[in-house]
Amino acid sequence: MKTINLKSVITTGILSGIVILASGFTMIPVVGDEMDKILNSRGLPPLSDWAILFICLVSISIGIFLVFLYSLLKAHFNSKCKAAVTSSLLVFFVTYFLSNASLVLYGFMPLKFAAIGTLWGLGELLLAGVIVPLIYKDNCTHISPNMS
């Protein structure tokens, strides 16, 4: 049974998280100041620097979780591609879809804005998932020091 290469999970996860984060920042020109308008309509201030830092940490955490899940699923699929897409879709459902659907159902987020973010999130997770098999390395086979 192969073990998970924790160092590779973390380093590849950080890179995947950076892809997620970069994709999130590229969405800003698409939605403009819509988030500030939504927050303002609810009597809330715009996102603070601390909130943006938190979003960055969450993106990195999602990237690490994505790679960890990939490393678990890879053993069950005989295809790195299937494992990457499946892990991306599972992470998408748990993180993006459920949270955005909840925000819409609670009346906090307009459907159009949440739909854009949800579809964008699907794309960014699939993109982040595609790089995982290219970078993630399994543990190397260890050679016993007693080679007599």
Image (cartoon, helix red, strand yellow):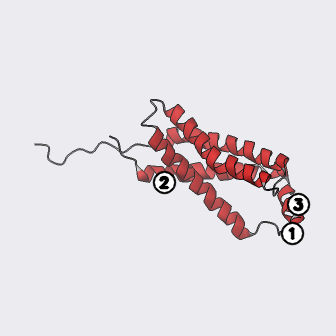
The amino acid type, in three-letter code, at marker 2 is: Ile
Residue denoted by label 1 = 43
| Distance from the alpha carbon under mark 2 to that under mark 3 | 36 Å
Please identify, in this view, whether the residue under mark 1 or under mark 3 is nearer the observer.
Answer: 1
The amino acid type, in three-letter code, at marker 1 is: Gly
Q: Residue at the spot x=81%, y=58% of the render?
A: 108
Say whether disc 1 or disc 3 marks the residue closer to the N-terminus: 3
Question: Few, some or many C-alpha atoms within 10 Å of disc 2 (few <14, some 14-19, many ≥20)?
Answer: some
Residue denoted by label 2 = 10
Q: Position of residue 134 (x, y in %)?
A: 51, 38
Residue denoted by label 3 = 37
Q: Residue at the spot x=78%, y=52% of the render?
A: 105
| Outermost residue toward the front in this view | 106
Q: Residue at the spot x=49%, y=33% of the render?
A: 80
| Distance from the alpha carbon under mark 1 to that under mark 3 | 10 Å
> Which element carries disc 1, helix, strand or loop?
loop
**141 or 95: nearer the eye?**
95
Q: Position of residue 102 (x, y in %)?
A: 73, 53
Instruction: Please state if 17 lies on the left or on the right of 48 as rendered.
Output: left
